[in-house]
Amino acid sequence: MAEHLTHVDAQGVARMVDVADKQVTTRTATASGRLLTTPAVVALLRGAGVPKGDALAVARIAAIAGAKRTADLIPLCHPIALHGVEVELEVVDAGVAISVSVRTADRTGVEMEALTAVTVAGLTLIDMVKAVDKGAVLTDVRVETKSGGRSGEYRRETASAGGAAARRPTARGSGTVLPAGTPAAVITCSNRSARGERPDDSGRILAEELTSWGCDVAGPRVVPDEVSAISAAIRTAIADGAALVVTTGGTGVTPTDVTPEATHPLLDRQIPGIAETLRAAARDRVPTSVLSRGLVGLASGCLVVNLPGSPGGVRDGVAVLRPLVGHLVDQAHGGDHPLVDQS
């Protein structure tokens, strides 16, 4: 990997890299991104469509056009002939998952073409759905894999503290998700963090996200991986009036992963559909995400959510929760079901 900016010369002047001496090889790249939007838009995309028409079909064509026009949009990119562009658009509970794979035989890679295609597809979707959701957000645009050329193979690793994936944003816009001042609590379940051996990145990220939703957040409170400690922390948060309690950590299958055991007796009603969606959110990137045993449910009218302990797991989780949590909290306090016109 280069230790300098290849598009800037020794004098700091921008330049187009000379690739004349590079070999022509088959090169591929896959990039992904996510459109985060409201349940109403998701229902329309799965049903009768949005006011501007077939949003997914238009976005697919836009992605291909964007890949082909990358050199016109990114000043220092080389014009190259593309041999294939594959676009996948999947409507999920949080919005639309976007993936684009680009292939060529040339002297330079196609990462930028894949990234541009994802971005143009996402912007097209925003244009298509803005009549219903003016706050839709395109996020997590990134390279997933690349092959070919002297730099060889690249595959994005799972999120870790301090890594690029751990820094990616997941918020669905700057507007609040919950009424300003909604009381919420973050609880980190980790022996190592409780002993001061590891920083609580997941709890910090989660607290920042809930604050951006409009919540008045207590915590993160760090507790050890013990049923009694976790249960007591959740009970205290509920007693203090929290409308939303989110835990991070302790959802796996090791002997010390006991967050579900601590949570289950407190729940009056489980919401298994959200728990399953949380597990599925990162399944394609992190197959072991299906091992999470996290629960979601209501305890004395408070929404309680168990998320995994990694920063990436937290980010995937809040992306799923963000379009839903306002409606969930409202329903938990007796709100009526909004009508969605699918005629």
Image (spheres, helix red, strand yellow):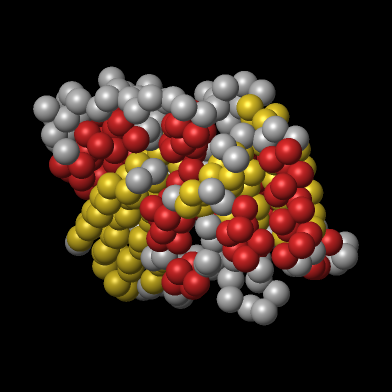
Q: Nearer the viewer, residue 322 or 23?
A: 322
Q: Quadrant of residue 284?
A: bottom left
Q: Nearer the viewer, residue 314 or 304?
A: 304
Q: Which residue ends up furthest to the bottom in the rendered image?
A: 255
In the visual, does 159 lie left or right of 338?
Answer: right
- The quadrant of the image that shows the C terminus is top left
Placement of 207 over or under 273, stated as above or below: above
Counting the numbered discs, the total is 0
The residue depicted at 62 percent of the width and 66 percent of the height is: 261
The residue depicted at 38 percent of the width and 35 percent of the height is: 37
Q: Quadrant of residue 185?
A: top right
- The quadrant of the image that shows the N terminus is bottom right
Which percent across, then down, holds residue 27?
A: 33, 68
Q: Is residue 65 visible?
A: no
Placement of 236 over or under 230, stated as above or below: above
Which percent across, then down, holds residue 276?
A: 41, 58
Which percent across, then down, holds residue 324?
A: 44, 38
